Structures are given as structure tokens and as C-alpha cells.
Amino acid sequence: MKTLAYRLVAVAAIGIALTFATDVFLTSANLLNVLRQASLTFLIASGLTLTILTAGLDLSVGANVGLSACLAATVMKSTDSIALGVVTGLGFGALVGVLNGLMVTLLRLPPFIATYGMLWTLNGVTYWFMGGETIHGFAPGFRSLGTGYWHGVPIPVYVMAAFLAVGGVFTRYTTFGQEVYAIGANREAARLSGVPVRARLNLVYLLSGAMAGLAAIVYLARLNSAEADIGEPLTLPAIAAVLIGGTSLFGGVGSLTGTLVGALTLTLVVNGMNLLAVDANWQPLVTGVIVILAVLIDVMTRQRAEARA
Amino acid sequence: MSRVPGAAYLLAMLVVAFSIFGSGFATVPNILNIGVQSSVLLLLALPMTLIIMSEGLDLSMGAVLSLAGVVLAMTLTKEYRLVTALLAAVGVGLAFGVANGLLVVTLGLPPFVATLGTLGIAQGLALVLSGGQSVVGIGDALPALYARQPLGVPFAIWIAAIAFIVFGLAYRYTRLGSYVSALGGNREALALAGVRANLYHVAVYALGGAMAGFAALLLTGRMSAGHPTAAIGLEFDAIAAVIVGGTSFERGKGSLGGTLVGVLTIGVLKNGLNVLEVSSSLQVASIGVLVIVALVLDSIVQSLAHRRRSVRTA
């Protein structure tokens, strides 16, 4: 909790700095834009948070968003049905999650390499499926999911809040949540105390895939177009959001609230760079530095805790 | 005992299948073409083998290679000599390799996330330096060198062959070679024997970075330009080649010969799919599937071997 407070102070500090450095930052239009962008990052990063809590990882989330969005767009265009498109996106995202889960539990592959293989498989299939085409122009009713407002607040923020509430209750107050933390803290101990480790891991990877599918739908509604490369720049920021939010790569420590704070921090940094007219080419570099710093803090915190124990 | 990697059978089957179904596959020019296409990959896969043997990973290699290509091309456009430009490229690669090594070994960061971070940094630097554009106008020296064919064999294949021999000799006859597999699985023993394990471990990552920098010679030579995203994702092919070649992430087991077979398997697969006119994006997907299949086969073989051992001891 204390570390989360530090992180919130960091968010506030960036916000104050940007208020003084730019004229546009502290306008409701810009702040709502930041919130909307952070909500999207949170949706992608939330399922990923669960996998990292179990000491696993899902490197395929970005590529999963890309292919799920392209499939959903295709179905929506060819059937004229929003519902079918949404079901396709969610369903495909979840299917990828199931495959990731099976690779980790049934085939016992290391999660980072299994989901990394999945990343490139999905990327290849997406480019092949789209063949350089762009699908754009969706029904206004669907687009409002990404671009609309309700009582002056962007709809994606409500989606984010709903999933944060549900996910927060699930991870903190249910047996499932306790078991997720237990697996990450000590898998063998969890197994010996009767946690169905494989079943829980399968569910966690399924959720990670399904959240990527959901993010794909919201993303599609926001962009109003689908191209093969839309998922590619999403993976590194999602991982950065989880790590900045204080979830440990070693498992068992962290929270979805932390990931939201991480997503906000990262979005503020990117927003600030945009407002200060920094070349967009700098973004991967800055995100890379942030990822390394976040892991460094994680490792040092852990070492200090071990030294104390 | 050095076991024949399963990929050798796979490679043989692929060659036979493509020779039957793809007209123009089994021709001398096409085979040389496979060699040329595989040469950059081999330069990355050789050090990647050592990194994976040490229970590590380097996801930054493709981005570092792209960055080194941009640096090489930019140095050449300023009319420096090729040697100077190559030194600059290798230097940039080496710096990233050392940084990876320090992050993983000295600071103890998990390798896949640490190198994912340096991937972002290298990619960002390449984009910023080049302004996101191809760097053209690199003069004649490099394209002329790249086009040479001593004894009828393309320059790229010579370089790849020399690199393979040097790595093979170094693995067999140097300390780094003898310590590398123990770095992952048996570090305690190294430390107890008074070996400065951290130094050798950083050196393994440094070598990976330097080789990624050196590979810019072939990549830039082939394209006659430096492009900031030219080699994005090539580290995945390198990891795939290493895994397909039978090196495993745990236990520190593996071989450079296996990696050569893995590189050729990927080269033959891509080329054969090309000859069969399968789109290049599905080729990327096929390598993803190939890796997963190789990992699954490896885990089945391991569990069978384990079962056999436990039956014998029972």
C-alpha cells in the first residue's frame, strides 16, 4: 500500500510538471483523452497482470489484440452485426488464451517462450489474413464504445472501472484470487495445500486472452479501422504498465489497482512527450528505459526484503 | 555423446518434400540463395546458443542489428572507410551487449524483460538517428565487397562459415566455451572452483551484442542501405533456430552444430515456402508453429528419457 502511495505521488508530480510546462495539459479535453488512453492500456494489461502474479507472463497480448481486432472487424463488416463482431473478438482472444494456458500447463513450456512463439505466430497470421488491406468505417452505435461519452466521461473509462472493480474483488476477496497469489508466491507449496494449480493457470491465461479480445473491441471502436499492425506497439507499454504498477515479475506480489496507476503513469509520460512536441520515434526508447527501471526497482525491493528476512 | 538433433531429420524431410513439390528448389543457384539468406541468421544464432545455454535470452538482437545497420550506413554516408564504419557498428552492438550483461548478471534482472527493455531502447535510437527513414547513399565499397564470390561462393556464406568455425573452436578450446553451460545449471560449482562466473556471464551477452553489430555488415551489404526496422523480429528466428537445434532453456544443454542445423531448417522452410508461393507472413507464422512443435517434442523426449531412467533405477 505504501509503495502504491509513492507511485501516486509520482503520477501527481508528472501531472504538475506538465501543467507548468504546457498550456494544453490541464484542459478537460486533454485529461479525458489521457484517461481514455490509460483505460485501453489497463484493459490489455489487466489480464497480463494476473499471469505475472502467478510468476508467468503473456507476451502475446499485443499480437492477440491485433488479430482479434482484425477478425472482429471482418465479421462486423461482412455480417453487419455488431454483436457477432464483438463475440468473434472476445471469443478469439479467449481461444488464444486457452492455447497459451495449455502450452504452459499441459506441455510445461516456459511461459515467456510459449507466449513469445504465440506472438510471432499471431503476427504472421494477421498479416496474411489482412493482406495489406485496411477495414474501416463501423456503425456509429459500435464506435461510441470507443469514442462516446456518458455524463462527460469517455465510455472506455467506464469499461475500465467496471473491470477494475470486478477484477479487484476477484483477486482480493475470492478463493480464486488467493490461489493466484499463492501459485505465484510458491507454486509447490500451493500445490501441496490443495490448490488446483493447472486449472487455475489455464483460467488465468484464458482471462489474459479474453481481456486482450475485449481491449481489441474497444480499440477497434476507438480507431474506427483495423490494420495488420495495430497490435504491435501495444505489448511493451502493457508490460511496462504492470511493472510500474508494482506487480513483481517473480510472482505473488502486486495488484490490478497498481496496474491502473502504472497505465496512468505511462500514458502521462507519452501524453507529455506529445504535448512537448517530442518526435514519436523517441517513444520506444523511453518505454524501454521505463521497463528497465521498473524491473530494477522490483529486483532491489525483493533483495532488500530477502536481506531483512 | 553428441546426439543428432531431431531437426536434422526434419531438415532432411523438408529438403526431400520441397525437391519433389517445388520446381526450382533443388538447383545450385537456389541452394546458394538459401545459404546467403541464412547467413545473417547464423551470425545471431551462434551467440544466442551460448546465451540460452547460460539459461538466458536476448530479445534485443534484432533491434540492435537494425541500429548497427543504421550506424554503419550513416558512417559510410559521411565517407568514412568501411573498416571504420564496421568498427562503429560492432562498437554499438558491443555496448548493448555489455549493457544487457550488466543488467542480467550484475543487477539480476530477468533476461527476457531486461532485453525487452533494451530492445525498445535500440529500436528507439535507430528510429531517432535515421528519422524513421532508410539511410541510402552508402557508396560502392560495401556493395562491391558483398557482391564478391571467392571460388564461386558468395561473400555472405564465407563470413557465416568462418563465424561458425571460430565459434566451434572457441567453444571447444577456450575457458568461456567450457564454462558457458555451467553458467546456467551449475554456477555454484564454477564459483567454488574460483572461476569469476559473473565476468564470463557478462562476456556471453557482450558477444551476442558484438555479433549483432557485426551482422550489420551483411544486412546492410545485402540492402545497400541501413533501415531502422530492417531486422525487427530476427531475434525470434535466432531463438527458433537454437531451440529447433536442440538447445534447451533449462539444464544448459545444447550444441553449435545443432544450431547450424536449426538455422538451415528455418532457411529451407522459408525458401521452400517461397518457391511454393506461400506468403511471407505465413512463413513467420510457420516458424512460430515450428518452435512450439520443437519444444513439445523436446519435452516428450525428456519425459520419456526420465521415465526410462526411473524404470532402470527402480
Image: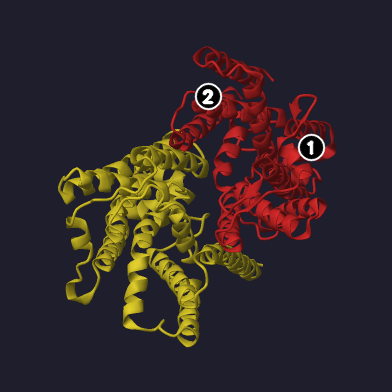
Left or right of A54: which side holds B268?
left
Kindly indicate which chain is depicted in red in the rendered structure: A
The three-letter code of the residue at mark 2 reads Gly
Chain holding disc 2: A
Identify whether B158 is placed above or below B67.
below
Colour setting: by chain
Kindly indicate which chain is depicted in yellow in the rendered structure: B
Q: Could you tell me which quadrant the N terminus of chain A lies in?
A: top right
Q: Position of residue A117 (x, y in %)?
A: 57, 57
Extreme residue toward the bottom, this view:
B20
- Residue A156 seen anywhere in this rendered image of the structure: yes
Question: How many neighbours does mark 2 have within 10 angstroms: few (below 14), some (14-19), or many (20 or more)?
Answer: many
Which residue carries the number 2 mark?
Answer: A272
Q: Residue at x 38, y 61 (%)?
A: B41
Label drawn at residue B67: none
Which residue carries the number 1 mark?
Answer: A177
- Asked whether disc 1 touches disc 2, contact meaning CB atoms under 8 Å apart, the reply is no
Helix, strand or loop at mark 1: helix
